[in-house]
Amino acid sequence: MAGAFRYVDGTRLMPKTWLSVEEQAARLRDRGLGIDDEHECLRFLSHVSYYRFSGYFRYWQRSPETGDNRFISGTAFSTIHDVYTTEQAVAASSFATMRWIVILLRTAFAHHYAQHVAPLGALAHDTGFAEPRDPAAPRVEDRVLRDLDRSQEVYITHYRDESCKNLQGQYLPTAYDALPVWVAVEGLSFGTLSKCIQACEGSGVLEDMACALGVARAPLVSQVRSMVHLRNRLAHHARIWNHSVLDAPSVPMNVKRRAKKSYGAFEPRSVFAIFVAMDRLLTTSGLTSSWLSLEIFPLLTANPLAARGLMAPRKYGDMDPSLTGSSSPKL
């Protein structure tokens, strides 16, 4: 029944009702949000859902976790709107740049795997990979086969032996014995590629990859994992502002010092830390030396509130009450 309370794991959920866009704007205003441009607010809410927008405006509410959804005095719709717009511009640039990085890592891995392990078939046989530390964790071979099996790309089906199936109709590793690794990587997700890179320690692949890319071997695996995390959030249009990264990238101290000197302090679990790792890889590999400085940082300089959420993420309730848009905080 509409409006009735529901309980999940003992927690009472507030009833939800349908609201028109005009009613959504009215609710925000009733809770204390300053809306100077009614037309722009309605236009925005017709393009960006109220629920999605709440992931941003809750940082300006008094205590949403306890049910106090009133806005901090002086909070303006334009302030939060500008944070959202800046984040979207940063996300668009990051996603476009991530494409270069994925292709770069595919190329480097395939080249050195073929050199050190084998050029044909070995990838599907788990050759050259270390056993997972957790016995219950999926094997790299299983991840590779999953990606290859579901691929309908001509460059994969051309090499796949349709006669090599088990009784359940699933492809056997031998179905890919003729598949070159430089072809296979084109059919792997970025997540699976990262698992391959992580598992090839000890075969010489990781060491030569790092050398060819001009980065340190030790932090490369964690950096790639964090890039996978960011790429997935970008691909699914998830919020990256005020997002704390659980699997933070390992950034060498000298790289961190230079970045802090150029851009200011940033926290290890911030999205900006991944940007620093991406920028370093782009620079040392020769792809570009100006992405962070010319594309990302000018956007953050123009909106310090957006910068804070990307460089020093906070939880609900940890937002400085003075940051309502009336003054621009330093980075």
Image (cartoon, helix red, strand yellow):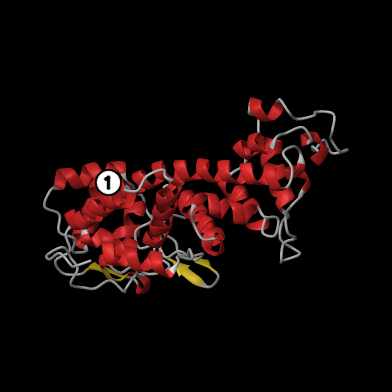
Q: Quadrant of residue 288?
A: top left
Identify which residue is drawn at 22% across, 41% down: 43
Residue 146 locus on image (x, y percent): 70, 43
Q: Between 180 and 21, which is closer to the camera in this rendering?
A: 180
Above/below status of 110 relative to 64:
above
Asked whether residue 190 appears in the rendered view, the answer is yes
Figure disc tally: 1
Identify which residue, 225 or 78, lies in the foreground. Answer: 225
Q: Which picture quadrant has residue 60? A: bottom left
* Horizontal relation, residue 108 to residue 151: left or right: left
Tell me the kind of residue under disc 1: Leu
Pinpoint residue 90: horizontal percent, then vertical percent: 32, 49
User: Does 79 appear above or below 260?
Assistant: above
Task: Please provide percent x and percent y for residue 310.
Answer: 33, 61
**At numbered mark 1, what does the secondary structure look like: helix, strand or loop?**
helix
* Residue in the picture at 40% in, 44% down: 97
Left or right of 200 in this view: 107: left
Identify the residue position indicated by label 1 in the image: 45
In the depicted view, which residue is nearer to us: 255 or 147? 255
Q: Hey, which quadrant is residue 169 in on the image?
A: top right
Looking at this rendering, what residue extends furthest in the right direction? 167
